[in-house]
Image: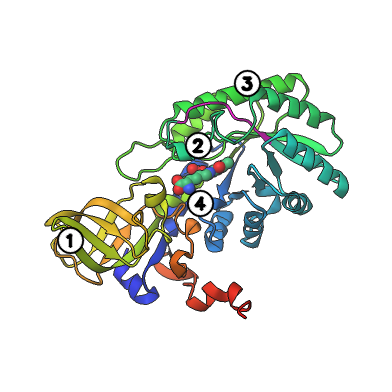
């Protein structure tokens, strides 16, 4: 990828997405479930750009959404309502109402209280709400604690006994139709065994429900398949599919997946330019670039490691250790720590952060009155802008009219 040409054309900093990679990831997952009824509901939160969603939609993906805003994005990008699911621990009444009006595939219920709200709203609208219950299987996903969700100590889902109660209640309700079951144990999973264990537990619950004449049609395994940021071993789609399928014998269900990171992370690059360099206390080296934590938060928030590539004429085998930091007034503002940086890197050279396609731009903010950067897609060897850079007037737009 010619990052220099791209920054010349679109400016810096910049997000660049390789649509070919997105497509290959999608197809590899779809192929792994070939011959089975499956729906890949793309986790819109990982990268919500309309053109990105559109591309997955064209490939046949549905959408997993966590706000009505995401549902509306998915629809706008061409995803069909019957392929959209709505998850999330705290859905507002107006969101539930709109989701019911829009006729999406199902709503993932996260508590008994939420089920009751959905019932009331469905009754008011005189519709039958298709629901799925998010069950918390209490399994350690062996990932970063901030992105682990399947343990009882996490706020997500309900335990197995509560789930049974919800299903029994929903079955006799005129306004609830329990069509699915859902679990999601965490993100950036690199081990198969927790997924298999969770799937087994939930499949057993489905069998138990069947005895009660509650027939689950959609078996939603959530997202979470990890990717390679540095040298972690990752899960192969085929093995993932086999692990899940092996737990489903005798069940006639459509497998729903909600992958985000697996589809988008390694197709995205965050590109910034070198501004200055300095040495504090004579030995600590800092490379100051124009991209910052407001643009890409993962390193600061999770101490996440992202590979970094340099576009420079400097000799890249002569390096010294240093931190790559942004212009924000926070010590935690860094893209990389203790990295091997070419000794002779120059003002204007590029620093490209890899694996930035998931939870990159979407977690950006306007902190320090920095406009959000532009996003560019690479498709069939051509680049095209898919989101404009926010200029100053855009950033102050919603405040300006209130000046006295
Ligand atoms: N489904 C549910 C219910 C989820 O909560 C999530 C992610 C996904 C699917 C998609 O997970 P994925 O396949 O992308 O791992 N900001 C964090 C990640 C937060 C993930 C939240 N939930 C990060 O940058 O690592």
Mark in front: 1 vs 2: 1
Alpha carbon of mark 2 to alpha carbon of mark 3: how far? 20 Å
Badge 1: residue crowd in 10 Å (few <14, some 14–19, many ≥20) = few
- Bounds of the magenta segment: 133-141
Instruction: Provide the secondary structure element on which disc 4 rests.
Output: helix
Residue topped by disc 3:
204
Q: Is mark 1 within 8 Å of ligand 1?
A: no
Instruction: Provide the secondary structure element on which disc 2 rests.
Output: loop
Residue topped by disc 1:
279
Q: Residue 219 placed where, x, y %? A: 63, 33
Q: Quadrant of residue 74?
A: bottom right
Most distant residue in the bottom direction: 404
Residue topped by disc 2:
186
Mark in front: 3 vs 4: 4
Of 335 and 268, nearer the camera is: 335
Q: Is residue 33 above or below residue 47?
A: above
Determine contact: label 1, label 2, CB under 8 Å.
Answer: no
Residue topped by disc 4:
46
Alpha carbon of mark 1 to alpha carbon of mark 4: how far? 36 Å
Q: Residue 373 placed where, x, y %? A: 44, 68
In the image, residue 126 lies in the stretch drawn in magenta = no
Residue 27 in sight from this viewpoint? no
Mark in front: 2 vs 3: 2
Alpha carbon of mark 3 to alpha carbon of mark 1: how far? 60 Å
């Amino acid at each position: 990828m010619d990052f220099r040409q791209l920054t010349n054309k679109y400016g810096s900093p910049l997000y660049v997405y390789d649509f070919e990679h997105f497509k290959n990831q999608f197809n590899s997952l779809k192929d792994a479930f070939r011959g089975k009824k499956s729906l890949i509901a793309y986790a819109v939160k990982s990268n919500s750009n309309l053109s990105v969603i559109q591309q997955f939609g064209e490939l046949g993906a549905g959408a997993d959404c966590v706000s009505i805003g995401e549902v509306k994005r998915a629809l706008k990008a061409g995803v069909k309502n019957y392929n959209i699911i709505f998850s999330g621990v705290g859905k507002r009444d107006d969101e539930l109402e709109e989701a019911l009006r829009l006729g999406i595939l199902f709503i993932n219920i996260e508590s008994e209280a939420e089920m009751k709200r959905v019932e009331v709203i469905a009754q008011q609208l005189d519709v039958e709400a298709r629901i799925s219950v998010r069950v918390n299987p209490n399994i350690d996903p062996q990932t970063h604690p901030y992105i682990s969700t399947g343990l009882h100590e996490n706020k997500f889902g309900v335990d197995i006994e509560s789930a049974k109660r919800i299903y029994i209640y929903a079955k006799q309700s005129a306004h609830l139709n329990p069509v699915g079951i859902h679990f999601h144990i965490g993100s950036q999973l690199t081990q198969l065994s927790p997924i298999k264990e969770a799937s087994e537990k939930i499949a057993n619950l489905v069998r138990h429900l069947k005895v009660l004449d509650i027939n689950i049609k959609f078996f939603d395994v959530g997202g979470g398949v990890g990717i390679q940021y540095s040298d972690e071993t990752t899960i192969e789609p085929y093995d993932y599919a086999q692990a899940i399928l092996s737990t489903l014998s005798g069940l006639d269900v459509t497998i729903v997946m909600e992958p985000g990171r697996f589809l988008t992370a390694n197709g995205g690059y965050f590109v910034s330019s070198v501004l200055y360099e300095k040495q504090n206390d004579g030995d600590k080296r800092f490379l100051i670039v124009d991209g910052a934590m407001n643009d890409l938060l993962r390193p600061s928030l999770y101490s996440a490691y992202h590979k970094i590539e340099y576009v420079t004429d400097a000799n890249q085998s002569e390096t010294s250790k240093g931190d790559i930091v942004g212009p924000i007034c926070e010590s935690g503002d860094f893209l990389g720590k203790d990295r091997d940086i070419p000794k002779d890197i120059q003002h204007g050279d590029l620093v490209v952060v890899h694996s930035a396609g998931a939870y990159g731009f979407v977690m950006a903010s306007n902190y320090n009155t920095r406009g959000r950067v532009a996003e560019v897609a690479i498709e069939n060897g051509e680049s095209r802008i898919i989101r404009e850079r926010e200029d100053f007037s855009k950033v102050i737009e919603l405040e300006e009219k209130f000046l006295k």
